[in-house]
Image (cartoon, rainbow, N blue to C red):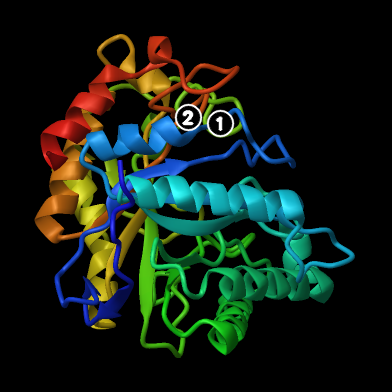
Amino acid sequence: MNNVNLQFLTCKGPQIINESGEIIYLRGVCFGNEVWHNDTIPTEHHGESDYERVRGWGMNVVRFYLNHKSLADNEAPGNLKNPAREWLDTNITWAKKYGIYVIFNMHIPPGGSQARGQGEALWDNPVHRDHLRFLWKAIAARYSGESTVAGYGLLNQPVPNVSLDQWQVLAQNIIDDIRMVDKRHIVFIERAISVRDHDKEDDNCHFPVVRDDNVAYEFHVTQPYNFTRQLLSYACPGDGGKYPDESRFHYINEAKGHDNSTNPVFPRNKSYLKASIIKYTRWIEAQSAPAYMGEFGTSLHSFKDNKGGERWVGDVLDIAHELGLHYTYHAYHDNDFGIYCNQDGLPDEGSVNTVIVELMKEKLL
């Protein structure tokens, strides 16, 4: 198969368009790249055939997780290591061949994973923040002329430990650094999932407002948390029940400490999911920017015993298409959420969750 001619993408109001002015919807899957437990190049996570496979499912983008330790040494954070350059270049070559855009996402930054509560050092130590800035500038400089790259996801699930201003300042600093070497690519800015020890959302839904015309705003969908994360020891170890379940009720904001005294309560069904998503998209629309659902996915346990994992995924996809969202499913090859869930080696057809594959093909092809 010859390389597919992917055009540069840019944000124009609430849309993402290519150089021909066509509206492009980025819809695909997340490549986790073993970032949570592997600091080296993950050669057994995926190969060329996996890009061909996701293209066959009707997808056109991969959210590509990065671990800073596999990219650069602390002594030279602005210099990508040779194995990292080769690995990233190889993935770009594979993606280009099958017409797949790539969103680089900094999943494990200097200072540790934000989402798993291990990344407070990023906010306490300015050296870590400087290293993150140097690393993004190095990545942007290398791929500034590569149209297969859709853009840069600066930080996965930020959890600033004092105030949202910490994320606002860091995000703007990284953008300014990137724009010194790359003025073309989209920057994907994620809402903070919380501020440590005081989780009540501000009027901006924890999104930082940045100065840049080529920005898409990103949010993740995990609601209802005890369903989508059920029986995962690090997240929600108990049985989270089934979906839908009209006997269970939820607030739109399930964050610890949030005042829901004036918010309506929803049964666990599609109306609840839609209200949870619209809370974010309404704010993004007001910024006249594209809305990107960077992660949505549910524990493999929710697909067992008629718990309804496939109903949850189908409803989220329907809502995303109705609202015109860009999205990536979490995750492609992973033990807890993966479309492929074999632990060792490259994705194994014997471990595939065919329910998700058929849903994706039904919605995208």
Q: Is residue 79 left or right of residue 321?
A: right
Using the image as rendered, state which of residue 110 and residue 307 is in the foreground. Answer: 110
- Which residue is disc 2 drawn over? 333
Identified at 74% across, 72% down, the residue is: 129
- Which residue is disc 1 drawn over? 45
The residue furthest front is 2
Q: Is residue 52 visible?
A: yes
Q: Is residue 345 left or right of residue 204?
A: right
Q: Is residue 64 left or right of residue 135?
A: left
- Please determine whether, in this image, residue 216 is positioned above or below residue 92: below
User: Which quarter of the figure is the N terminus placed in?
Assistant: top left
Using the image as rendered, state which of residue 167 and residue 329 is in the foreground. Answer: 329
The amino acid pointed to by label 2 is: His
Identified at 57% across, 75% down, the residue is: 164
- Please determine whether, in this image, residue 191 is positioned above or below residue 204: above
Quarter of the image holding residue 283? bottom left
The amino acid pointed to by label 1 is: His
Mark 1 residue crowding within 10 angstroms, few (<14) / some (14–19) / many (20+): some
Mark 2 residue crowding within 10 angstroms, few (<14) / some (14–19) / many (20+): many
Task: Tell me whether circle 1 and circle 2 mark residues in contact (CB < 8 Å).
Answer: yes
Identified at 19% across, 43% down, the residue is: 317
x, y percentage for residue 321?
A: 14, 52
x, y percentage for residue 80?
A: 73, 62
Q: Is residue 191 visible?
A: no
